[in-house]
Each structure stands twice: as C-alpha cells, then as structure tokens.
Amino acid sequence: MHWVNWAIVIGWLAYVAIDGLRRAKGTKNIEGYFLASRSLPWWAVGLSVMATQLSAVTMIGTTGQGAVDGMRFVQFYFGLPIAMVILGVTLVPFLHGAKVFTAYEFLERRFDAKTRSLTAFLFLLSRGMSCGTILAAPAIVFSAIFGWPLAWCVAIMGVPTVLYTMIGGVQAVTWADVKQMALIVVAIVSMVTVLLFRIPVSPGAALHIAGAAGRVRAFDFSFNLTDTYTFWSGIIGGTFLMLSYFGTDQSQVQRYLTARSVDEARSSLLISAYWKIPLQAMILLIGVLVFVFYLFQAPPLLFNPAHERSVREAQPAQFAALEARYGAALSERQGAARVVASASDAGGDAERAAGVAFRTRDSVVTAIRDDALNLAHETTGQPSRDVNYIIPRFVIEQLPLGLAGLFIAGVMAAAMSAIAAELNSLATSTVIDFYRRWVRPEASDRHFLNVSKGATAFWGLFASVVAAYAGTLGSLIEVVNRFGSFFYGSILGVFLLAMIPSARALGAFVGLIAGMSAVAWVNFGAPQVSFLWHNVVGAVTVVGVGLVVGMFGRPTPQRQPVQGQQG
Amino acid sequence: MTNPAPAPASGPSRFRQTLIRVMTVQVLTLIALWLLQRHFTA
C-alpha cells in the first residue's frame, strides 16, 4: 500500500488515541468513568451506540456478503426499529429511573443477588469472548493482506483502544465513537462514488446486471426456520435479538444510562436505529457494486492472498489449470453481462433471456471458484471461504490514492469503537456486579476508579489473547456467535419477567436456567434452525417457566438499594 | 420583525419527534428497497 495511505491510517489512529487521552481530564470519579456523570448529549450517545454496532466485521464482512449474496442480508435488521420503540417505552424508563450502573444491578433490586450474578456472569463470559473475535476478524484479514504477523495486527488496533478506554472511560469512548462514525460514513460514501465512476456501464445497467444475478433481492417472504435471512426471521427473530442486545447487554445499556434524562436516553436509543437499515443497505450495495465491477475487471481466483500463495506453491499445475478455466469463464460471463446491460433498455423477453444466459455463465464461474476454494482448504488445512477478503483486496488494488487509506482507517475505526465500548462495559460489570458487590463494598471512589482501570486493562489483554489465537482456532467466531445466542434470549426473558408484577425471584432463576436448556436443546437437537429463532425460544421459555414456578415461590420482598447504589 | 428561532424540543415531545423521524426514514428505506427489487429483478 502507498505511503500516503499509511500516513492516513497512522494519523487517524494517533488522533483518536490522543484525543481520547485528552478527554480523561474530566474523569475523576467512578460515575464519571462509567457514566460520564450522566451528562452526555443525546446525539453523541446515539452516534456512539451506532458506532459500537458497526464493527469491522460489518465493514468487510457485510460488504463481502453483499458481493456474494446480494441485498437480502438487510432483512436481518428489520426488527430493529420495532425493538427500539418497545424498549423506549418499557425497559429504558425502568433502567434509567433505577439509577443503576449496570442492567444486572436492577435485577438484584427486583429479584435477588443470585439472579443478578448469574446474568452478569453470562454477560462477561459471552462478551469477553466476542470482544476478542471482533478484534480478530479484521486482524486476520490485515495479516493475510499485508503479510504481517497476526499479533502485530491485533496490537495496532488493540493498544490505542485499550489506552484511551482505560484512561478516559466512557467519556473518551463516546467522543471517539462520534469521530469514528463520521469517518465510517465518509469512507462508505466515497467508495460508492468511486465504484459508480469505475464501472463501465451506467448505474441503471449495473443494477439490471446485479438484478439478473439476484443480488438486489432485499425481500424474501418465504417462511423457513432454517433460513436466517427472510422477512419473517428478520421481523420476529430479529426483534427478539435486538430487544436482547439493546435492552439487556451492558455494552449497549451503558450507552443510554449516560444520558441526562429518561427522554434523552429514549431519544438516543432511537437515534441509533435512525440510519441502521439505510446504512446497512448502503454497505450491502457497495458489495453488490463490487460484484458488478468484477464482471468487467478480472477478479482473483482466490481473494485471500496468503491462500493464493500457498496453493500456487503447493499445487502449481492444478492451480494453473483452474486459472485457465477461470479466465475463459470470466470472459464469457463478461460478454453475457454486456448483453444484459444492452437488453435492459429493451425490457420484456429479451431482458429475461439475457438474464437466464448470464446466470448460466455466472454459475460456471462460481463452480470454478468453489473448486479453487476446496483446493485451498485441502492445501492449507484452514477454512477457505474468502468472503471477508473481497473488499480489502478490492480497496488496496483498485481504489485511488488516499481512499484506500481512508477505508482501512474506517475499518480500524469500526473495530476500535466496537471494542472500546465492550471493554468499558466489561469493566463496569466486573467492578459493580462482582468486585463492589462481593469483595470490597465499602472502598473509596478513588479505589474503585483504579480497580476499574485495572479491569479495563485485564479485559483488553484477555481480548487480545483470544484474538491472537482466533486465527489458529479456525471456527472460533462461529462458536462464539452460537455460544452468545445461548444466552441472549434467556437474559431478555429475565428482564421481561422483571416487568411483570407477579413474577418472583425463584421463578426468574429457574426460568433463566430453563431458557438456556431449551435453547441448548434446539441448538443440538435441531441444528438446522437458524440462530435468530433461539432468542425467541429462550425469552418465551424463561417467561413461561418463570411465571409458573413463581406461583409456588414466596413473594419477592421490596428491596432496599444494594450496597453502594444511589437512589 | 423576524420570528424567534424555535426552542429545541425537550422531554416527551423530543421523543415523539425522534420516533416519527426514525419511522419515516425506515419506511422510506423499505419502500426504496422494494422499488429497487421490483424494477431491477427480472
């Protein structure tokens, strides 16, 4: 990559770290460190929540998904606005009004200490692991693209993030997120503009070609429990997932607890939903346009350069034969794409026939790519699916000077803002739900502040170690996603129970365990059921079992605020 | 004489305004995606 691009990347990382450290000046006590003394403006909180969700996986994985599978992934987010409205009128007033530091603290007040500790423990376990994988995903890609050791790539993003999060607390995290979000939007808009100029047909013809390949289909109304990306799984499963994530995950709850009032908290939550579907659609559209771009410019047979080198060295004859077949298939597909572009004006039967011919040519290219991916898997012994490498490779090889640096900085920004918020929330829960609750309830504010900084550093180290080993563990990301889906719906169920007056502590605890067992049963007994439905199963089981068991339990006594709480 | 600038909305009215804007943006996006699919998928 050109030095100008590197200068942009390094300049941005330095700016974010230094500005984050500067923000630390206002952080003198534990409430300032974890909740910015509840003084942040709603728009900054909203942008922060949005930046937290846009991880590097979104920037490189979702765009890659758009290139290979089209727009239908956007249905995953259809439940988000519904979840935001439900949370805005239910859980947010409860949590903000309770004046708590963590969502789990509220559960002790409503139920008992063991329900609080179990949910907080489940959060630490799943979020600690996922924090590592969020860091690992871009680090693995950068390592393969630039040929650097994985540990370096982890350190480049991890060290500045841990530093500003540890020293500046949530104040530094939020203001860094605002800047990161601006950079991400600029990077995305620039890339769309460049693509529209580089594709040798009109934007309308490009979309006709993408449509012929099925890449602009954003709605799939079929009802299929095994398919993750349908309208119904997005609306029903997605709503439960978003309710769980935004209503009960400390990394999100902590963002709106920093707002000045309940209404500012609700507004900030809505702001995070504002551009989510349009932004995701735009990110997917980038992938679709990259797909069209590579119809007219020969794409590599394997997008992962490390795998490409290995296969070329280990199986030169086989790889050369595949490349020859691939070249011929690409030119035939390009010809078919040009016919679709010209037939798009004619419409009717001519357009349909051109579309059928194009799909036939495209399926030949896909089959050859599949052969190459299988060869890479046999040669390297690693998973060879290269969706995450399509966009970084395109950016480095095709974007004009400066824009590649801007996009790489945007990917790093996305990873950093996602990790920063998670580190801060992991530290918050560690200190408030465990250290202050069970170890040192009576220590000074200064002591808790120092412990919090130590906890942030610990989780930063933990995430870096997980990230450094994630490459060798292969399917760790998938394991963590499935692992996380065990808990999300069940934890949401506990919070739903908390809002039902007749629910009891015993019911909440037994319901939580029953919910996780039900999800485990579905996961292992019917693995083909999409993980989005696990959230529905978990939440419904917890509420059902919790209410039944609660009928036999003692009434939950009205609790005084737990040790160290205000309000 | 010019009208004074409207005071920034606060409290429930801000929530309502934000809710209306958010839902408008989502609905417009869904309509745009639907039109995109209708027009470009043969």
Image (cartoon, rainbow, N blue to C red):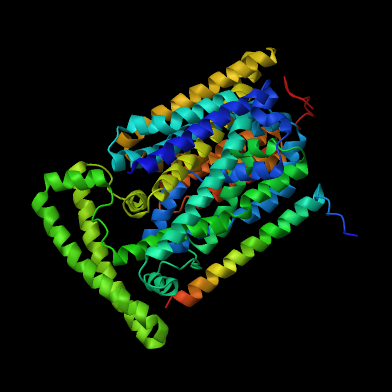
Query: Most extreme residue toward the right, as rendered?
Result: B1
Give coordinates of residue A131: x percent, y percent. Answer: 47, 35
Q: Is residue A148 left or right of residue B28?
A: left
Q: Quadrant of the N terminus of chain A?
A: top left
Q: Residue at x 48, y 67 (%)?
A: A220
Q: Closer to the camera, A490 or A308? A: A308
Query: Most extreme residue toward the front, as rendered?
Result: B1
Residue A150 falls in image quadrant? top left
Q: Residue at x 51, y 25 (%)?
A: A163
Q: Is residue A470 above or below residue A237?
A: above
Give coordinates of residue A94: x percent, y percent. Answer: 75, 39
Q: Quadrant of the C terminus of chain A?
A: top right
Q: Is residue A187 left or right of residue A213?
A: right
Q: Residue at x 49, y 40 (%)?
A: A413
Residue A502 falls in image quadrant? top right
Q: Is residue A226 visible?
A: no
Give coordinates of residue A242: x percent, y percent. Answer: 59, 49
Q: Closer to the camera, A517 or A133? A: A133
Q: Is residue A92 left or right of residue A135?
A: right
